[in-house]
Amino acid sequence: MLLGIGSAEETVYRTILENPSYGVTELSLELDWPVDRVRATLDELAKLSLLRPSWEEPDVLRLVRPEVGLAALLAREEAALLAKQQEIERSRTAVAQMIAAYGDQNTARPSDDSEALVGIDTIRNRIEELVADCRQELLGFEPRSAQTPENIMASRPLDEALLGRGVAVRIIYPDSVRNDQATTGYATWLTGNGGRVRTTPVLPLRMLIFDGRTALLPTDPADSSVGAVLLRGAGVVAALVALFEQTWGGAAPLGEERRRDEQGLSDQEREVFRLLSTGLTDEAVARRLDVSVRTLRRVTADLMERLDARSRFQAGYLAASRGWLPPSP
């Protein structure tokens, strides 16, 4: 679907572009469609402001120039994308605040809404229990692209058990997972057995959500082996599910070629510009993207070359002037 235009609408619109004089009858003959379908599609194009009533013949729809109609649709899509990005950032902030609230728990103190877990053995044992009780869906963020053999070995039998009893499994990795053969192999195995995997440039932290009721988060996002907090509060878990769904909606299926926008930028490249524009160092940006500093600098150098910029400052100015950076909230 291009800019919110369905396949039927796009077909009719392209036909009218090539044959501006065509009316309903000619379109019906050209496309071998029933007249009612042609009329319904023309009505949808009018709603999208790609057709408008003729000033001279109000009952006749005239083509809106593509540079006007399509530009308006593009602006609408960009505004929706910006709003979504801002909502994700607000959700990330809320998640960070939640983690901070529980981060000072050093011993396991179960309560109705939370339970602190200390040590990798305790965490993995609790995950096994949660997987055994999971009946509908497991959602997960896995921000590290290179999984250790131990993590893969521990995850596989649990995922096999979930998929074997029909539990839906959806996992999001960073785009950089493509650089690690072992983790990519595991993600491919997961999709081949009924799971669904997508990738996105940046993930805020590691997270597992069981049946939309229980969420497991690390107390230290930089080292998930130190400890974790198990959350059961309906409001908190609902917010985390919303964060997952927003991220999932903007992520690309595993193995799909990186999508590029109208400026030719991939999601990862646009995220590089966004993070650098906030003043983060190369090291900090590389950690956020889960890539090496060398890889980040290679991507940055390529972007500067495409902009014909001699410095990062000039690159930032040129990127902003060309619309490569999202406007400030």
Image (cartoon, rainbow, N blue to C red):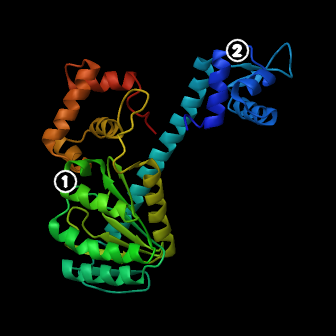
Quarter of the view holding residue 305? top left
302 vs 223: above or below: above
Residue kind at label 2, given as amino acid type: Pro
Location of mark 2 (residue)? 20
Residue kind at label 1, given as amino acid type: Gln
Q: Is residue 162 left or right of residue 306?
A: right
Measuring 34% from the left and 66% from the top, which residue is drawn there? 207
Residue 123, percent across and down?
A: 26, 79
Looking at marks 2 and 1 on the same chain, the residue that comes earlier in the sequence is marked by 2
Query: Which quarter of the rendering shows the N terminus?
Result: top right
Residue 129 seen from this side: yes
Q: Nearer the viewer, residue 326 or 16?
A: 16
Residue 163, percent across and down?
A: 40, 72
Residue density around tag 2, few if under 14, some if 14–19, many if 20 or more, within 10 Å: few
Residue 183, percent across and down?
A: 23, 58
Measuring 34% from the left and 70% from the top, which residue is drawn there? 101
200 vs 214: above or below: above
60 vs 84: above or below: above
Q: Which of 90 and 179 is in front in this view?
A: 179
Q: In terms of secondary structure, where does tag 2 sit?
A: loop
Q: In terms of secondary structure, where does tag 1 sit?
A: helix
Location of mark 1 (residue)? 181
Residue density around tag 1, few if under 14, some if 14–19, many if 20 or more, within 10 Å: few
Q: Is residue 323 left or right of residue 146?
A: right
Measuring 13% from the left and 39% from the top, which residue is drawn there? 294
